[in-house]
Amino acid sequence: MTAVLGVDGCPGSWVGALVEAGSVRWHAGSFADLLALDAAVVAVDIPIGLPAGARRRGADLEARVVLGDRRSSVFLTPPRVVLEAATQAEATILSRAAGSVGVSIQTFHLLARVAEVDALVRSAPAVAARVVEAHPEVSLRRLGGRSLPPKRTPAGRAARLDVLRSWLPSLALPQPRPGRAQPDDCLDAVACAWSAARWLRGEAEVLGDEVDALGVPMRIVV
């Protein structure tokens, strides 16, 4: 297989950009649905590999350094124990008991997606071998070499499309969009696909290079 898949979360599901021979095919569905596509590498914008306590993942800290003025876009991964929480309040209690900090409502709302990917990555070696973690803002910074305006603004979308066209000259936002994906979700998926292609070619930069207590890699592929 030579196709690569970039995946980003979107309202109600995930959006995937399947890239092969310079063209993009768009998909939406569960993460398991997207894993069923014929892609040699799947790069997803969600933390893979979770810390056990207070220590932050090296990948997250290194990504923040890369982004500088946009470092707040990097999700600081909470400890694995918070995946057991049913509410934000419970997540905060569990996180603090593990020696970490409280869990924001934004972080809590991402936990179901983290758990969805974590379960699939740990389900089989073949899945783990195909799936890597990416961060769209870091990918775009490396590809474009500059800081970009906020992604939900017209200027931010235009700038991201311009940067991604340096890789895929014919790239356009899909019409209609897959599922309930927003324009920035689609562009983030393509940015992840760029990092997946670099990983497939053996050219990717790796931020962090650790494993968690269950042996799952904690790294961001760029």
Image (cartoon, grey):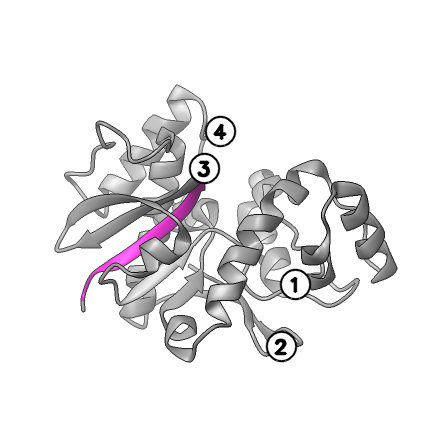
Instruction: Estimate the spatial distance between the alpha carbons at disc 3 and disc 4, rounded to whole Å.
Output: 23 Å
Where residue 190 appears, as percent x and y from the top left, is 31, 46
Q: Which mark is residue 12?
A: 3
Give yes or no for residue 6 being in the magenta stretch. yes
Reading the image, the residue beneath label 4 is 150
Q: Quarter holding the N terminus?
A: bottom left
- Label 3 near label 2: C-beta < 8 Å? no
Identified at 22% across, 62% down, the residue is: 38
Tell which circle, 2 or 3, labels the residue nearer the N-terminal end.
3
Tell which circle, 3 or 4, labels the residue nearer the N-terminal end.
3
Reading the image, the residue beneath label 2 is 214
Point out the residue furthest to the front here.
Answer: 86
Q: Secondary structure at mark 1?
A: loop
Give yes or no for residue 172 being in the magenta stretch. no
| Vertical side of 152 occupied by 119: above or below | below
Categorize mark 3 by other alpha carbons within 10 Å: few (<14), some (14-19), many (20+).
few
Q: Tell me which amino acid carries mark 4.
A: Pro
Magenta-colored span:
2-9
Instruction: Estimate the spatial distance between the alpha carbons at disc 1 and disc 4, rounded to whole Å.
Output: 25 Å
Categorize mark 2 by other alpha carbons within 10 Å: few (<14), some (14-19), many (20+).
few
Q: Nearer the viewer, mark 2 or mark 1?
A: 2
Instruction: Estimate the spatial distance between the alpha carbons at disc 2 and disc 4, rounded to whole Å.
Output: 36 Å
Q: Nearer the viewer, mark 1 or mark 4?
A: 1
Categorize mark 1 by other alpha carbons within 10 Å: few (<14), some (14-19), many (20+).
many
Tell which circle, 2 or 1, labels the residue nearer the N-terminal end.
1
Reading the image, the residue beneath label 1 is 57
Where residue 57 appears, as percent x and y from the top left, is 65, 63
One can see residue 78 in this view: no
Tell which circle, 1 or 4, labels the residue nearer the N-terminal end.
1
Left or right position of 148 against 59: left
